[in-house]
Image: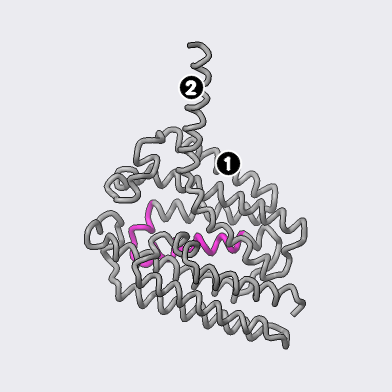
Amino acid sequence: MTARAPRHAEQSRRGTLGVLLRACRPRQWSKNVLLVAAPAAAGVLGDGSSDARVAGGIAVFCMLSSAIYLINDVRDREEDRHHPRKRLRPIAARELSVRLALGAAAILTVAGLAIAFAIATDLAIVGVGYLALTISYSLWWRHVILLDLIAVAGGFLLRAVAGGAAAGVPLSRWFLLVTSCCAIFLVAGKRFAELGELGERTGSLRGTLHGYTRDGLRAVLAAAALGAVTAYTIWANARPTDEPWYLITIAPFVLGLARYGVLLGRGEGEAPEDAVLHDRVLVALGLVWSTLFLLAVYSGA
């Protein structure tokens, strides 16, 4: 009996840690790969010091975003219990206590900001901005049409900015504009998918969802895609080189946006990370674009 008690306690701790990890949504951590964008565009990847700082920045944003997910799931646990998919989240399913979730969120926040300060002061400032934006979104912006789109897209943009801060590279206005437009495209696509899947049946679950229409979101998607393609094309044409690699990257970039639009038309996109990572055509286009882009940057073009 005495021997079994420690073993049972150890199994219980492991089970709790597993549930906590699931509540931190590790699948969502793929969004933090955006921190690589600015260092890659600047051509500093491969430098040991820069790589370490960027990797640290990714870890920081995994911690900070996990803290926000825990806080949001605590806040939304009653609503989530009526959602066909979100009811399975650990806090909504009562697998994880509110006290433990908030305690873990506090630890992740403090640890994440401490690591950010150790890497670069600018990274810590961006991290604080990310926390302020996401918490204010949870409290206010999520209830205001269009502002909720901008706030969520701002979270993507701040990840890209954090990559530049971690590596110590400046960000061009074209980089920021392309990133912003692509972020709005993804977020509007998520709302479009949510409206198609849940709008008529459980529209009250999201405060602003009832205020959108599919035609209106199509207009936002078209405008964001046009802005991204225009800004990217101008940037590629402005590169100080006679080599064609940057111009060639325009093709897979445009096709990637078009392919994602096709997926949205099929009703996918409520979970952008799943749509991006599980569609073979989109993955292939992403690999082609990445290869061509890195070739352009590191060939000395």
Question: Does dot 1 land on a helix, a strand or a loop?
Answer: helix
Residue 8, labelled with which disc?
A: 2
Residue 238, labelled with which disc?
A: none
User: In this rendering, would 99 be left or right of 288?
Assistant: left
- Residue under the image location 30 percent in, 43 percent down: 78
* Image quadrant containing the C terminus: bottom right
Give the mark toward the camera: 2 or 1.
Answer: 2
Residue 11 versus residue 213 in the image, above or below? above
| Tag 1 residue | 110
| Of callouts 2 and 1, the N-terminal one | 2
Q: Is the magenta stretch mostly helix, strand or loop?
A: helix
- Residue under the image location 50 percent in, 60 percent down: 155
Cα distance, mark 2 to mark 1? Answer: 31 Å
In-front residue for pair 109/269: 269
Looking at the rendering, the stretch of residues picked out in magenta corresponds to 139-162
User: In this rendering, would 35 be left or right of 204?
Assistant: right
- Residue under the image location 65 percent in, 81 percent down: 246
**Figure quadrant of residue 258:** bottom left
Q: Are marks 2 and 1 in contact (CB under 8 Å)?
A: no
Kindly identify the amino acid type of the residue bearing the numbered disc 1. Val
- Give neighbour class at mark 1: few <14, some 14-19, many 20+ (Cα, 10 Å): some
Q: Where's residue 86, x and y in %?
A: 35, 49
Kindly identify the amino acid type of the residue bearing the numbered disc 2. His
User: In this rendering, would 112 be left or right of 208?
Assistant: right
Please indicate, yes or no, whether residue 90 appears anywhere in the rendered image: yes
- Give neighbour class at mark 2: few <14, some 14-19, many 20+ (Cα, 10 Å): few
In-front residue for pair 130/156: 156
